[in-house]
Image: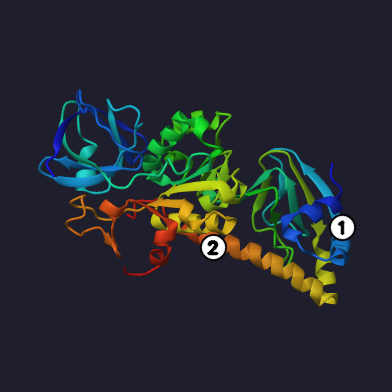
Amino acid sequence: MVPRFMPVLDVWDDTDDTFTVELDPGPAGFSFRPGQFNMLYVFGLGEVPISISGDPATSGRLLHTIRGVGPVTSAMRDLAKGDLVGVRGPFGVPWPVGLASSRDVVFVAGGIGLAPLRPALYHVLNHREEYERVSLLYGVRSPHDLLFEDEVTEWRGRFDMAVRVTVDTADRKWRGSVGVVTKLIPRAPFDPHNAVAFICGPEIMMQFAAEELAKSGVRAGRIHLSMERNMKCGIGLCGHCQFGKDFICKDGPVFTYEALHSRLDVREV
Amino acid sequence: MLSPEEVLKEHPFFKGISDQHLEFLVSVARPLRIESNHFLFRQGSSADCFLVLHKGDMAIELHVGAQGARIIQTVNAGEVVGWSWLYPPHRWMYDGRALNTVDCLCLDGESVRKRMEEDHEFGYEVLRRFGEVIVEALNRTRLQLLDVYGTGD
């Protein structure tokens, strides 16, 4: 429960409302698994759960990609080099990248949901020979809101990965797809009977994406979603993030669609 | 290049349709190739056909005043485009622009409507398929309207 204090190495904007904070974990480094999150504490303001967005193979720099929506996350945008941030973690159940080995892997990201998925993408690409076909299906509001644009462009250029991006609306300068991310699923290159899917984004988008994947033949137990709730303690004690029988912080944030689907469309769990 | 019969037989939209109905559809189909950035139809013009895309992608656009043309949806090979031919006043509601070279079949709307009136079984088959397309488009549009990627401000 006691935070480690880490100095800020850098802060940069990813989009108009999203930025990345790079922390120095010190000589001991910081080990985490793809999909895990940290509780980040800003002095005098409070603590928030933020997914780790960097490469798990690079323990010397710790990245969190954040959208400024509340007082704590907005204050994080104003952090400067050398400022200290309290870090508790890593917490939570990670993306089961091992289970995806020898299978087609489908990443479905919506908006800032690409950030919690990126460590799993790094892992798969770092161990590319262990996986079959890899697809990234990414939906955002507009071309202006594309997260990690340079990296997505680089991935798009790879011969061993299919990248499809769609936006909700665009002008004529946009040459890509327009429409919801679920529309990309039927055309993505994967064998539904041998595929594992990782989905992260707004809950309603994840629900529709999981339904579309299940409709295409992917087993509900192989569809994984990362849930978000108001987390406080991060270790399953306070109950703030309770979702039915589970605590999102301790039993999640990554769950199978099989475990969640009966709860996703319930008004109050 | 595939013949109209081959295209319609393989196209997901017509999956399961009877040989007799297929034969009629082939008789009213006209192959069309549109180069990138050219328009397949323009907003307000006469919607005298619907398009069965078998190669390429197109953008459905709406001119929004000072904002200019906004792409509201993209459509890909394996889909059909247009239901304005079904109902009066038979005018396209949007612009349809090719994003790359598009190969499609243009099926004559007036002939299909006439056949639907004469042969209600055929009419049901056509309307059922368009119903699915319309419902899917409506569901996707509803999801887009939610602006799920916004901050909720």
Label 2: how many residues lie within 10 Å, few (<14), some (14-19) or many (20+)? few
Taking depth in this image into account, of A135 and A252 the one nearest to the observer is A252
Whole-percent x, y for residue B62 in the image: 59, 52
Q: How far apart are marks 1 and 2 (CA)?
A: 31 Å
- Please, which chain is the residue tagged with disc 1 on? B
Single out the residue that lies furthest toward the top.
Answer: A27
Residue shown at 21% from the left, 59% from the top: A240
Question: What's under tag 1, amino acid-wise?
Answer: Val
Lateral position of residue B49 relative to residue B77, left or right: right
Asked where in the image residue A42 lies, by quadrant, the reply is top left
Observer able to see residue B46:
yes
Observer able to see residue B47:
no
Which quadrant, please, contains the N terminus of chain B? top right
Taking depth in this image into account, of A60 and A154 the one nearest to the observer is A60
Q: Name the residue under label 1.
A: B26
Q: Name the residue under label 2.
A: B139
Residue shown at 50% from the left, 62% from the top: B142
Lateral position of residue A156 relative to residue A21, left or right: right
